[in-house]
Image (cartoon, coloured by chain):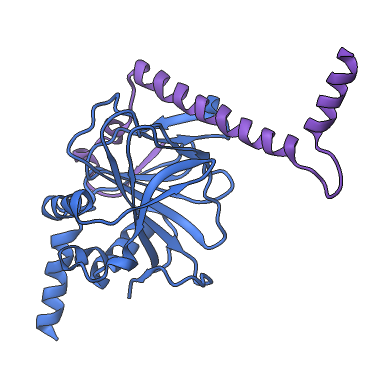
Chain colours: A blue, B purple
Amino acid sequence: MMTDSATAIETNDDILAFGTVVRRTVPYLHIVSPQFYTELFAETLLRWLESGATWRLKEAPLFKQYELGFTHFKHCAEIEGLWDPGVLARLRDAVSKGFGVPVSGRINISAHKLVAGQHGSIHTDNEPDETHRLVVQLNRGRASDAGGNLVLLSGPTTDDMAIVFKQETNSAVGFGLGPASYHAIGRVRTGTRFTIIYTFLTDAVTVKNYFVAP
Amino acid sequence: MDKVAMSKPEAFDPESLIETDPIILKQVQKDLSEEYIRFMSLVLNERLNARPRGGTSLFDHLRKAASNESS
């Protein structure tokens, strides 16, 4: 047991950094972190996204992007730390502390890939079974005019634009989901924008496309 | 106060993750505006073209009205 426990702790530290988290309240409650994964795991995951992933194009009036859900990739050993129970437990605890409210251990993990011309228009993601979202940027450096910025807004129109986040690799932004959580992804102009999306679900969720933190 | 440090606040300024270049901000807002207009056009177009069962759409009415006016 001691060995298992020690191994789990070591694994957690190998995957997740997330030691610095700052809470902000404008335009609505959100958290930011400069380093989400360890450098080693961020590189491993980015390399997998660039070459090992199978993407599905999703097009809707509001957005156009490639997506994947990690519950379909449990066989990929090189990235299994992503859904390691110890990592998810630490993530849940850190996010709960960040927001000041307990979040569920039911966590959907997905990835988005946007290429030139793709975008996400202003929306809230106010879904009944989703409470919080955490977005992690992964890239090899994106120019400030490359497009694809995550934007938080205080309302439903572009005049309500409040925060435009830079796309520093391995940085994370989390926010609560509700009727006022207006956000958008600016149109990608050049290069490829990769993000890992953690969605914290309610206990009432029925679709089993999530991992569970113990 | 806009921010509450959870840990190691001295090592990280969250403002460093926020875009402040006015040229970039203007570009982002322009792109969002274009997508917003495109989306609203789609919604409007869909509503104008919607035909109640056995009825006519708003577009049909408008076309008919325009045709009557021009004749």
Decide: is A72 above or below A183. below
Using the rendered image of the protein, determine whether residue A132 is visible from the camera's viewpoint. Answer: yes
Percent position of residue A147, x then y: 34, 29
Residue at coordinates 47% horizontally, 39% vertically from top-left?
A183
Pick the front one: A8 or A83: A83
Q: Is residue A182 left or right of residue A108?
A: right
Q: Is residue A167 left or right of residue A66?
A: left
Q: Is residue A99 left or right of residue A88?
A: right
| Position of the N terminus of chain A by quadrant | bottom left
Residue at coordinates 90% horizontally, 19% vertically from top-left?
B68
Pick the front one: A68 or B2: A68
Residue at coordinates 90% horizontally, 14% vertically from top-left?
B71
Image mark count:
0
Q: Residue furthest front?
A: B71
Percent position of residue A161, x then y: 48, 29
| Position of the C terminus of chain A by quadrant | bottom left
Percent position of residue A170, x then y: 22, 45
| Image quadrant where residue A93 sits | bottom left
Percent position of residue A8, x then y: 16, 73
Pick the front one: A1 or A199: A199
Using the rendered image of the protein, determine whether residue B1 is visible from the camera's viewpoint. Answer: no
Q: Residue furthest bottom?
A: A1
Residue at coordinates 24% horizontally, 70% vertically from top-left?
A84
